[in-house]
Amino acid sequence: MKSENGVEYRFIGSVNGKGTTTQTSHYSFIDRFAGKGICYYKLIQIDFDGTENILGPTSTKGCSDNFELNLLLLSSNAASSDFLLSAPLEGAYLFRIFSNDGKTIMTQNFTCNEGANLLKVKTGSLPAGLYLVEVFNRNLHFSKRFLLGLDR
């Protein structure tokens, strides 16, 4: 479990145990999304019988104060919409547009660099209106409502 403030923790991964043994066992887990600042960690050991043992918290430097996605609509015309995605990490991101009744209208994959990325999304087939836009990868999520296609 990980926290940037020492109060609110979220699950970041797991490591399978080696079972009951009299030998010393060593485990490791790398937090690939640590940035700047202080992070707090807790370990939850779950035995085969379901017994939980919470260890920690412990802290370390290496957590960002602003480690999140952000999305800005730059323009929307008859063929496409241009979004500016601020991504804290390079990698694959999924971009989805939902109608007001929650139906997925469009899904598009992007490979992004760390920092600012221009996303050209083919929205020409959508009627002008309000849509929910969602961008996420394995560990990060952003959603916001946007007016698309108003200048058609």
Image (cartoon, rainbow, N blue to C red):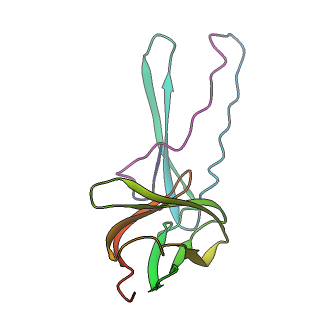
Residue found at x 42% / y 16%: 51
Q: Residue furthest bottom?
A: 151
51 lies above or below 109: above
Residue found at x 54% / y 73%: 121
Residue 18 colored magenta?
yes
Residue found at x 48% / y 66%: 68
Q: Position of residue 53 (x, y in %)?
A: 44, 25
The C terminus appears in which quarter of the rendering? bottom left
- Residue 27 placement: quadrant: top right
Highlighted range, magenta: 6-20
* In this rendering, position of residue 99 left or right of residue 59: left
109 lies above or below 128: above
Q: Position of residue 96 (x, y in %)?
A: 47, 60
138 lies above or below 148: above
* In this rendering, position of residue 35 left or right of residue 76: right
Q: Position of residue 77 (x, y in %)?
A: 46, 85
* In this rendering, position of residue 91 left or right of residue 4: right
* In this rendering, position of residue 83 left or right of residue 7: right
How many numbered discs, if any? 0
